[in-house]
Amino acid sequence: MSDFDSEIVAFDNVGLRYGTDGEVLRDISFTLYPGSFYFLTGASGAGKTSLLKLLYLAQRPSRGAIRMFGSDVITLPRARLPAFRRRLGVVFQDFRLVPHLSAFDNVALPLRVSGMPESDVAKPVADMLDWVGLSHRYEARPATLSGGEQQRVAIARAVIGRPDMLVADEPTGNVDPEMALKLLRLFEALNRLGTTVVVATHDVHLLKKVPDSLIMRLDKGRLSDPTGALRYPPRAASRENSVS
Amino acid sequence: MTKSGTLNRAIVRGFSPFGGDRAARLVPQARLVGPMPWVIAIMVALTVIAAAGGLALQNMADTARAELSGGVTVQVIEAFPAARERQADAVMDALANDPAIATYRRVPEAELEALLEPWLGVGATDATVPVPALIDVRLRGVADRAAIDDLQTRLLQIAPDARVDAQSGWLQPVFAAIASLQWLAIALVVLLALTSAAAVWLAARSALGSNRNTIEIVHLLGGTDGQIARIFQRSIGYDAVLGGAAGLAIGVAGVMVLGKQFAALGSGMMAGGGLTLFDWLMLAGIPIAGVVIAIVTARLTVLASVRRML
């Protein structure tokens, strides 16, 4: 298997503009490998959320090429994209929970969308709610949950399907330091199981908590990669050894 | 990830589509308190009444045509009573021996007087106004142009003042009016169907607008266009079933009331306008068609909207 085949995501000279405005992302090139842990940092307005939108297939780039799971997702027929999205877990900055569904049903949503039989849904959802400390609030609607609780439900929903890649936009922004660390440990645990994790954050303290992580830094729409670790990352094999 | 890996994942997760009750729960259900079932009920009720009217007119026209299809009237238009009677008798004899004639009947003078009385007054026909001798004839075949011309030719040899007319000819303006009313009923049914589709389209767009956040979430979690469409199809389909059933009940009640009133007129022609079992089955099919229209419209509306997303 070549490096290109084993990649999770490869951006090649990607640019993004909204309407006729100037580019919010310029000349973005990088490769994400299975089992890697990435932090995406940058000042507010640097383009982090726009880059994440490209990663979780909510947006097409204005130029450049994006390969994901071995396929060119720019030219891929639209009908095939849902299968790719089901391999992703996304934690949105604004949580994006379904307002009239309970915490349980929100977390169960990815499993139900992917067609899991209803009899198999209850246990993993209950386990996941227990893990994020919300088992006692499984019937609660998002409006009755605090910001931190909503964020934990959003994270539980993102990871319940054991995604190949987890994309999280400021996932610890609304939780206390203790819970932030706990959630980060959850991401690490997923990462050790083979999930590629991309966490956008402006919290520099968080970066130090995951020593093996790679840092993607965005500055005014450009990705800085001074060491070349993103464009030419260490081989996945060496990471797998370090994980084991 | 290889194809077999993807297949294994699909097998683990299962192939069952996301639909049914758990999909419908994604959009808030506000049935009956919302306008949709009532709009559909009104549309179905009006469609049932319009369609029943069209079918009744069709039956009325068919019955009248069947009754008159072989009917002809022979008039002997002669001012002198003695000559008129002689020619009329000759015509009666000829008709009696004609194998093409099923039945014939000389219309009695008393009956003629009664027919003309409203216009000419009592006893006016005795001597002052010469009234033609009328013979009501029923042919074995259809009273088409060729049959009438043939009979006319034969009768002219024995009764030079005899004139033969198809009875259906007298009712041609009535048939034309019925045909116009039928087209009007068809146009009404089509317009009501289009209006129903437009109402569902608006309702689906409104539901899409108020649930856009939910749709985007399902979309980003890997929901297909079909899955998202099914969420709304089921919801609107349920409304359509409720509305259709109510509309059918209202429409049928309206048709029965109107039917009773027309039957009370006691007109021979109106009596032919009753609905058959097949007609009632067709009316029962209207709410089913309404449900199909609602579901298809909702699906197309939702699909057109979600296709704008990546």
Image (spheres, coloured by chain):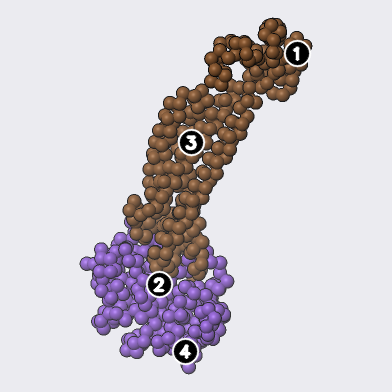
**Circle 4 sits on which residue?**
A220
Chain letter of mark 2 equals A
CA separation in Å, label 1 and label 3? 48 Å
Kind of residue sitting beneath label 3: Ala
Q: In front: A206, or B93?
A: B93
Earlier-in-chain disc, 4 versus 2: 2
Kind of residue sitting beneath label 4: Lys
Q: Are marks 4 and 1 on the same chain?
A: no
**Circle 2 sits on which residue?**
A89
Name the element at disc 1: loop
Give the x, y percent position of residue B241.
Answer: 40, 46
Give the x, y percent position of residue A155.
Answer: 33, 73
**Dot label at residue B226:** none
Eye-nearest disc, 4 or 2: 4
Name the element at disc 2: strand
Q: Quadrant of the C terminus of chain A?
A: bottom left
**Circle 1 sits on which residue?**
B160
Chain letter of mark 1 equals B
**Circle 3 sits on which residue?**
B52
CA separation in Å, label 2 and label 3? 56 Å
Earlier-in-chain disc, 1 versus 3: 3
Kind of residue sitting beneath label 2: Gly
Name the element at disc 4: loop
Eye-nearest disc, 2 or 1: 1
Task: Tell me which chain appears brown.
Answer: B
Name the element at disc 3: helix
**Residue beneath the point at 51% across and 23% down:** B268
